[in-house]
Image (cartoon, rainbow, N blue to C red):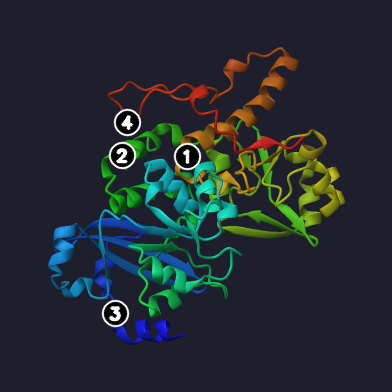
Amino acid sequence: MALALLFTACREEKPVIKENVWDTHSQLFWVDSAGGERVAGIRSIVGADTLKKLFVLRDSAAFNAGKNLPAELSGAMVLRTPLKRVAVLSSAQIGYMLRLGVEDRIVAVGAGKYIADSSLYAKATAGQLVEVSPDGMNVDYEKLIALKPDLVMTFATGGSQDDYDRMEKLGIPVMLTSEWQETSVADKASWLSLYGDLFGKEALSDSIEREFKYDSLAASPCEGRKVLAGMSYGGVWYAPGGRSYTADLIKKAGGCYLWASDTTRELRLTIEDVIALADSADMWVNPGMFGTPEEILAAEPRAAHIKAFKNKKVFQNDGRKGPGGGNDFFESAVARPMELIWNLRDLFLADFQLLADSSGGDVKSLPGLTPPVQSPSEKGPNKAQSEYLPYTWYHNIF
């Protein structure tokens, strides 16, 4: 308690960030120059509110000089970059750091049991990474303060477990990341560039980002491959809306999402509405938390009437798990959009391979079977489909 009072007493009230810094930026995050500084801005949707946070990124010399911030950046948190010691409290943050090879800068995690990467999991198990929220809910603030991290990376949902406000009051440097609120595969992956700026890996993040910003992220013609998503809980079917990450992934992988025309991020439907559409869905993805046909039927027996279930075309994203059961889909997949798209596309097209074989048709006439081939001088490298397929987050549960 004394420690908390000390940090609270030393904390100065922060001036309000001036709105004009945000005027030209509509994304959830951005990195740009402003007021003679390198600045990162992050928006987080927290309930009915939108939090806006600014971070000034200074190298060691500029950080030590400690010059005052210009008026337009008042209230911003000043960070010494590249960051050397960070605490990360979400799986996605680990995934971006793994992709850039800076996971050795992690000094603390939330709960080690949720880590999918085997090396980091082993370090957490051995006590070489401090667990500041072993139960996945309550944060040990004194542990965080004792670690003196350059930054704590966490997130906010608007629920009672949000901890960022308490951290700020204790003087702990904290950054909310909102990549999980992105509605497209490319936008979520683009957060890698922020991590490049934070950890001094700008060139590497730029080279990786060039790979997933070329035309292979354009949607493939669905050719009738209709896809159902979501699951029923208590008679209510929860599904991603048409403006959601999952809907965009299905589209990029060449599927026709049943609710693609919807303009929301989340849908709540009656199980009767879904059963009425059951015969129009060739495939089913993301069946809630369930990983086997038996688990699905135990939770919702009427799922047996869904065409995709009857035809054994149900794809779950838990194909890659860590030693403690952590789902790698929420860790490394966020920073590997090409591998993720080809993983799901391969499952979608395998279904059409069977159709073509049975009908005597030429499967090669189907669109989207091979990745676009581009010359080295174009936006992205040439890659064969096989180079993307070792990452099998999605798999058929049958």
* Residue depicted at 74% across the width and 37% down the height: 397
- Identify which residue is drawn at 60% across, 47% down: 327
Q: What is the number of the mark on residue 204? A: 2
Q: CA distance from mark 2 to mark 3?
A: 34 Å
Q: Marks 2 and 1: in contact by CB < 8 Å?
A: no
- Tell which of 241 and 204 is nearer to you: 204
Where 351 falls versus 154 (above or below)? above
> Front-most of 335 and 150?
150
Residue hosting label 3: 16
Q: Earlier in the sequence, mark 2 or mark 3?
A: 3
Report whether 25 appears left or right of 71: right
The CA span between labels 4 and 2 is 15 Å
Q: Residues within 10 Å of mark 2 (few under 14, many from 20)?
A: some
Q: CA distance from mark 1 to mark 4?
A: 16 Å
Report how far apart the C-alphas of labels 1 and 3 lie in the structure: 37 Å
Location of mark 1 (residue): 337
For numbered disc 3, what is the local secondary structure? Answer: loop
Please state which amino acid type lies under the numbered disc 4: Lys
Crowding near pointer 1: few (<14 within 10 Å), some, many (20+)? many
Whether residue 300 appears in this view of the structure is no
The residue beneath circle 4 is 379
Of the residues shown, which amino acid type is indicated by label 3?
Answer: Val
Q: Position of residue 191 (x, y in %)?
A: 39, 50
Task: First in sequence, mark 1 or 2: give its number.
Answer: 2
The percent coordinates of residue 89 (x first, y second) are 49, 60
Residue type at numbered disc 2: Leu
Q: CA distance from mark 4 to mark 3?
A: 41 Å
